[in-house]
Amino acid sequence: MKLAIYPGTFDPVTNGHLDLVERGLRIFDELVIAVAPNPKKQPLFSLEERLALIRESVLARGYNNLKVEPFGGLLVDYVREKGGVAIIRGLRAISDFEYEMQMALMNRRMAMKIETVFMMPSEEFSYLTSTIVKEVVSLGGSVKGLVPDIAEEAMRRKLGIGT
């Protein structure tokens, strides 16, 4: 069984994230969505809220070879602990590549047996970020079709914006 780890902040989970999950499950036998606390990013949702939103979003899709867990510390240590063989990272634009390549090379230096697999989201989600989604909702716009419905509802509640 080949296990991949898909790490991120997921604040909130988007349909772009779920697109990569679905496509990652075509390549790997099992997948763990590893949610980082990442207080430096000042997330809108707490770690517990993000875990719940992701779990509810993937539960509706019926995946049985997927787990959603929190993680902290070095990613390669977490991947080793789980018995993973790969890290999945999304690349939306060339601007993502430089940072992601640096991280992948550092991870390889620390753990040569763990591969980083870069995946591009489907074209319809190629521009999508959690930051953009939060900004649109905070200004009263709709992100229907870009995030799971429960994520949009949770953002509106959190930001005090009517649905």
Image (cartoon, rainbow, N blue to C red):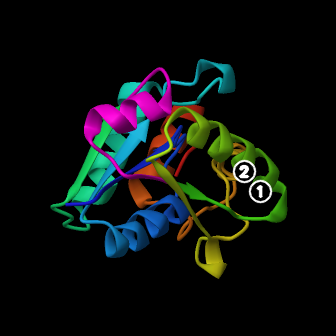
Residue 123, quarter of the rendered image? bottom right
Circle 2 sits on which residue? 101
Q: Secondary structure at mark 2?
A: helix
Circle 1 sits on which residue? 97
Q: Secondary structure at mark 1?
A: helix
Number of other residues with Cα within 10 Å of mark 1, as a class: few under 14, some 14 to 19, many 20 or more: some
Residue 12 falls left or right of residue 97: left
- For residue 51, the mark is none
Residue 55 falls left or right of residue 5: left
Residue 7 falls left or right of residue 82: right
- Residue name at image x 45 percent, y 47 percent: 114
Cβ–Cβ below 8 Å for labels 2 and 1? yes
- Residue 105: x, y in percent? 67, 44
**Which of 85/12 is in front?**
85
- Residue name at image x 57 percent, y 43 percent: 108
Query: For the N terminus, which image quadrant?
Result: bottom left
Q: In this orientation, does residue 139 appear?
A: no
The residues colored magenta run: 71-87
Q: In this orientation, does residue 149 appear?
A: yes
- Residue 120: x, y in percent? 62, 70
Q: Disc 2 or disc 1, which is closer to the eye? A: 2
- Residue 9: x, y in percent? 53, 37
Query: Label 2, label 1: how many angstroms apart (C-alpha)?
Result: 6 Å
- Residue 17: x, y in percent? 50, 59
- Residue name at image x 47 percent, y 69 percent: 19
Q: Residue furthest left?
A: 64
- Residue name at image x 28 percent, y 50 percent: 56
